[in-house]
């Protein structure tokens, strides 16, 4: 799988990062530094670069893992000159500027509140196990500045949790050409190696998944659907069939009592829908909400009689109702892979647009 992932990465045209090659990738509003330097050095390097960018308001957030540093920028990377940005403002800065950035991280930005809390607990200045978060954690630096607690925190940070000398050395080696530096711009999707950190921090990672990951997502969707059980309501005889396994349904499901294929798959209160249908069959009046629920169920049943089991599968996907299901089913997919791919795209489209529906 690793070899396949690297081959997929190479197929995008991007260089493969190594311990002697740093790849800077731009995608959408994200910049991914592929730096195989480990947790501590990547964290330190990320803090220093963020401090250098902070003066121009370029970075919104950033994260790191042992192999990558991810920056969420305030502008799309297509509007930024990545080469100029990094060669001049990161790798090309003078030693006093770089040292000032390191000092700013260590003493002004101060991302060490948790370590300071532990030190303060050992010193007896805070009760052990005390829950602190938010502003209370941020105030620790001011509270213990110019105290032995502050000095001990800085000492431990420099010894165990950061490597500013190492970060300076990496920047120097890149500038001197001892470490190969490459740039790459991803267009529609990030490289497979970048996706490992992006999927943990972007809003809808499935939308940017590379092909090998998208295939896995589609497989998981299929397994999830086929593992479900649903209730089905027959519109001809009013019989409710409970807990029918989607995986075991025939291509064209039918009612076990009357053999009708006019079955509505129910994914919400099946008893409620059944009662409404019985009221309708008994010629009782329905209120507005009941009429809407019955109409929706009937539209679902119409799809089942036309498309069979695939109509049930389509409507069992999160965010896909009768209208969207009809659009997907009308494509008359020849293969299940194409069918599930369109279902996944419809689901992602729903997730992406749902927050704007009430605006």
Image (cartoon, rainbow, N blue to C red):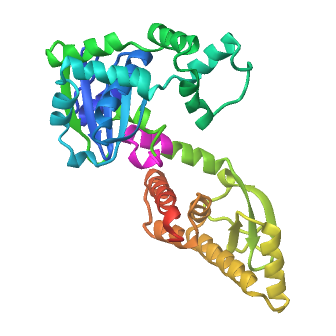
Most extreme residue toward the front, as rendered? 146
In the figure, is residue 129 to the left or right of 278? left
**Residue 254 vs residue 275: left or right?**
left
- Give x and y (percent) for residue 56: 27, 41
Measuring 35% from the left and 14% from the top, which residue is drawn there?
Answer: 164
Query: Where residue 200 sits: x, y (%)?
Result: 49, 37
User: In the rendered image, which quarter contains the N terminus?
Assistant: top left
Q: Give the range drawn in magenta.
A: 203-217
Residue displayed at 60% across by 66% down: 308
**Viewer-closest of 82 and 48:** 48
Identify the main secondary structure in magenta: helix
Which corner quadrant of the image does residue 261 belong to?
Answer: bottom right
Q: Is residue 72 above or below residue 253?
A: above
**Where is 341 relative to 326, above or below?**
above
Q: Give me the residue at 17% from left, 41% from top.
A: 81
Residue 300 appearing in the image = yes
Total count of labels:
0
Q: Can residue 1 be seen in this view?
A: no
Is residue 212 located in the magenta-colored stretch of the structure?
Answer: yes
Q: In this view, does 71 lie above or below 288?
A: above
Q: Residue at x 55, y 43 (%)?
A: 220
The quadrant where residue 47 appears: top left
Q: Quarter-wise, where is residue 276 in the image?
A: bottom right
Of the pair 242 and 357, the residue shown nearer to us: 357
Residue 186: image location, x then y, percent = 26, 42
12 shown above or below 294: above
Q: What percent of the width, then of the height, locates residue 196?
A: 43, 32
- Depth order, front residue of 356/215: 356
Residue 271 painted magenta: no
């Amino acid at each position: 799988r690793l070899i396949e992932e690297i081959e997929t990465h190479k197929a995008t045209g991007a260089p493969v990062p190594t311990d002697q090659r740093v790849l800077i990738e731009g995608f959408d509003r994200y910049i991914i530094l592929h730096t195989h330097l480990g947790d501590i050095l990547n964290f330190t390097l990320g803090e220093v670069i963020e401090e250098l960018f902070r003066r121009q308001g370029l970075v919104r957030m950033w994260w790191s893992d042992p192999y990558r540093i991810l920056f969420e920028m305030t502008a799309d990377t297509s509007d930024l000159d990545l080469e100029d940005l990094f060669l001049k403002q990161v790798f090309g800065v003078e030693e006093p500027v770089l040292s000032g950035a390191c000092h700013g991280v260590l003493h002004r930005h101060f991302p060490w509140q948790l370590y300071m809390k532990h030190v303060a607990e050992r010193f007896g200045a805070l009760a052990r196990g005390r829950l602190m978060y938010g502003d209370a954690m941020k105030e620790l630096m001011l509270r213990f500045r110019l105290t032995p607690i502050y000095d001990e925190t800085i000492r431990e940070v420099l010894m165990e949790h950061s490597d500013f000398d190492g970060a300076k050395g990496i920047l120097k080696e890149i500038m001197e050409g001892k470490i190969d530096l490459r740039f790459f711009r991803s267009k529609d999707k990030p490289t497979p190696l970048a996706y490992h950190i992006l999927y943990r921090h972007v809003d809808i990672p499935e939308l940017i998944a590379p092909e090998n990951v998208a295939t896995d997502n589609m497989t998981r969707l299929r397994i999830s659907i086929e593992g479900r059980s649903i209730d089905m309501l027959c519109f001809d005889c009013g019989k409710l069939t409970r807990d029918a396994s989607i995986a075991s349904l025939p291509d064209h499901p039918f009612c076990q009592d009357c053999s009708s294929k006019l079955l509505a798959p129910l994914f919400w209160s099946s008893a409620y829908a059944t009662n409404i249908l019985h009221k309708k069959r008994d010629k009782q009046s329905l209120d507005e909400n009941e009429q809407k629920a019955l109409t929706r169920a009937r539209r679902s049943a119409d799809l089942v009689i036309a498309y069979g089991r695939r109509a049930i599968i389509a409507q069992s996907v999160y965010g896909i109702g009768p209208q969207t299901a009809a659009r997907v089913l009308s494509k008359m997919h020849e293969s299940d892979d194409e069918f599930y791919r369109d279902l996944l795209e419809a689901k992602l489209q729903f997730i992406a647009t749902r927050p704007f529906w009430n605006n």
